[in-house]
Amino acid sequence: MSAERGTIEIEKVYRSLPLWLAREYLESIGGRVVCEDLVQGDAWSATLRHAPDFEIGALRVGQIRVVFHADAQTMPRVIAAFEKKALRAGG
């Protein structure tokens, strides 16, 4: 739970999604870039961070961490809109 009353925080990790592209996706769903790692929309915000690469044997895949902040009603809509863009076929 965040400091703002009624706001929840959900952290998700995404593989094979560059940070710059995640920022563009967040903008396309109504966010505005506040700084390199923060995008704010109406009643929501998302913080972007690089995460350690995911590794299996010799395979190494980049990861990012996105922390969404929103109220309980807004959160599902924001995550669904972002993930619709982030889960693209062909990488």
Image (spheres, helix red, strand yellow):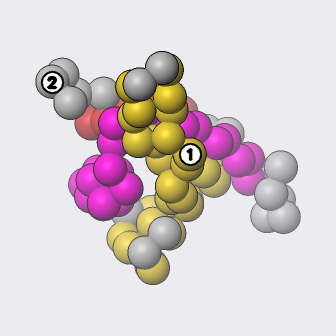
Q: Nearer the viewer, mark 2 or mark 1?
A: 1
Classed neighbour count for the residue bearing mark 2: other residues with Cα under 10 Å, few (<14), some (14–19), many (≥20): few
Q: Residue at x 55, y 48 (%)?
A: 51
- Amino acid type, mark 2: Gly
> Is 67 above or below relative to 53?
below
Helix, strand, or loop for circle 2?
loop
| Residue matched to label 1 | 52
Please identify the quarter of the rendering in which residue 39 is found: bottom left
- Measure the alpha-carbon separation of dots 2 and 1: 22 Å
- Amino acid type, mark 1: Pro
Classed neighbour count for the residue bearing mark 1: other residues with Cα under 10 Å, few (<14), some (14–19), many (≥20): few
Give the camera-side residue of 67 and 56.
Answer: 56
Left or right position of 88 against 22? left
Disc sitting over residue 30 in the figure: none
Q: Which residues are magenta?
A: 7-28
Helix, strand, or loop for circle 1?
strand
Q: Residue at x 43, y 75 (%)?
A: 36
Residue 55 part of the magenta segment: no
| Residue matched to label 2 | 90
> Is 89 above or below relative to 49?
above
